[in-house]
Image (cartoon, coloured by chain):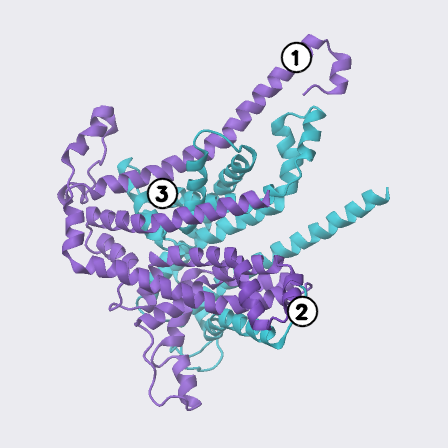
Amino acid sequence: MNSTWSRFNIVSVVLGLSFLYLPIVILVIFSFNASKLVTVWGGFSVKWYGSLFHNQGLIDAAWVTIRVGLISASVATVLGTLGALALTRYTRFRGRMLFSGMIFAPLVMPDVITGLSLLLLFVAVNLDRGFVTVTLAHVTFTMCFVAVVVQSRLVSFDRSLEEAAMDLGAPPVKTFFQVTLPVILPAVISGWMLAFTLSLDDLVIASFTSGPGATTLPMKIYSQVRLGVTPEINAACTLLIGLVTLGVIAASVVNKRREVQRRRDEQAAQRA
Amino acid sequence: MSSATASVETSPRQDADASILKRLSLGIAGRLVIIVPYLWLLFFFLIPFVIVFKISLSQTAIAIPPYTPVMDFSDGISGFLAPFKELSFDSYIWLTQDALYFNAYVSSLVIAAISTVLALLVGYPIAYGMARAPASIRPTLLMLVILPFWTSFLIRVYAWIGILKPEGLLNQFLLSIGVIDDPLIIINTYKAIFIGIVYSYLPFMVLPLYSTLEKMDDSLIEAAKDLGCTPIGAFWKITFPLSLPGVIAGCLLVFIPAVGEFVIPDLLGGSRTLMIGKTLWKEFFSNRDWPVSSAVAVVLLMILILPIVYFQHVQARTQERGR
């Protein structure tokens, strides 16, 4: 589509974006509220951020969440990338239907079902609920998101590059690491980031599969939110939002730079 | 497989050996690529469903904590089969006897359907506007729509509590400009759930819509206009039908998870609204009745299996087209 950007179009985009951002902006503003009431402005203050750092329960939960996120996102990225390769490179193998079903179904599966079924599995195999079980659960539901992201990149991948490498004598594994992986790396990285934030966000699956000593940040926030809205939670949320926003912006800058570099390389190659 | 240099330096026999070796290693590597994620998903995705199904058919007394082993693998296949002799449909009968469950399923489906339609109505103009934007700012707009999706779901739902409360910001604003005289009661009603679902799932609706609208060929609409079609007529006759794949994908991405949604009805809907995700949660965490919560999950899955299979079908088709 390339025609004019009418006033109607501009208005709908602006309204839509304000709908998406206004609640978040309000939440951030009220984290700086001096008053204990979250809906009445009582002057600017950062005291809630100070009290946040004395809340040991919250800090412990944040630490658990970050460790679960780092480990599960990394494992999920490996498994998801393998899954994407299997789906795009092997168009026929026994049970492929079931496989693609198991990759796509978790994307829309309600969290309560995934959480309950994983918990019952862990109980069935006598695995104590805690850090390990949450991590395993997060690997399982995030690897499918990684697989979809990586797969969409692999579909448009020029396979003649791989064939050329193999013809020149590179074994398949080496071909993957030296030819395929560098090309699909941006998709793999954004898959990892998606897996990490999904793990960071998850409340329902973690509540089912976690045990004593492995309370994650969303679980902690949820139990406090149920008691009411407090500026301290607003402050915690603002820190999380800031962290994620920084990560996403950094990733997109890196991606853009790589893109520019790639274009420059291509031009140089053409000139040569 | 044989490379030019290799055939010069080595005898044909050695070359053939190398070729077999290479094909063998390709076979092993290829198999591992499939087997590792396959086994993981079998064990952590498919088998858990079998267990849920199994527990939903067991007696309440057997499966309640402290955790009795559900399947005793130590006895081999007989230990695996033994529990099947004690199948019980009590949990399912219980589901039909208490109207609470039936009402929860129906109201979840209705809420999800209404929210999906609302999300489509809100999302379509946004996606359309984005697709019509100058190509230079489209990536920025796309990123602005995706960014809220990266921030925590829980936080975004939580943000609405302060806005929708009777003494919250929305009521303060509407009262101050004189639109209303009494505060609107939105929180703890179904209205709040609609707002929460539309808000949280909007990016899922906008993204597939945008990707179909962006690829659309403008000349079709110009041709229609040249032939005397009004802009609105051209939209309904050409743009909308061509964007249907995006509409379907977006609606499925909103509808299916919304049916089983827990956080939104729990935080915004209060105790008087009914949704099945909340019922399942309560059954499990408050009543600690594992067989009944498993039965609730199995029935929910049965209800959602058709839309999920359709979603997979749509996904697979777009993937084929991409190739």
* Chain letter for the residue marked with disc 1 in the picture: B
| Residue that sits furthest to the right in the current view | A272
**At label 3, which amino acid type do we have?**
Thr
Q: Quick one: label 2, few (<14), some, or many (20+) residues within 10 Å?
A: few
Vertical comparison of B71 with B122: above or below: above
Determine which residue is flagged by label 2: B226
Chain A drawn colour: cyan
Considering the image in quadrants, where does the N terminus of chain B appear?
Answer: top right
**At label 2, which amino acid type do we have?**
Asp
Determine which residue is flagged by label 3: A133
Determine which residue is flagged by label 1: B16
Mark 3 falls on what kind of element?
helix
Whether label 2 touches label 3, CB < 8 Å = no
Mark 1 falls on what kind of element?
helix
Which residue is located at x 43 percent, y 49 percent? B311
Using the numbered discs, state the Cα–Cα distance from disc 2 to disc 1 in whole angstroms: 66 Å
Mark 2 falls on what kind of element?
helix
Q: Are marks 2 and 3 on the same chain?
A: no
Q: Quick one: label 1, few (<14), some, or many (20+) residues within 10 Å?
A: some
Vertical comparison of A140 with A91: above or below: below
Res A168 quadrant in image = top right
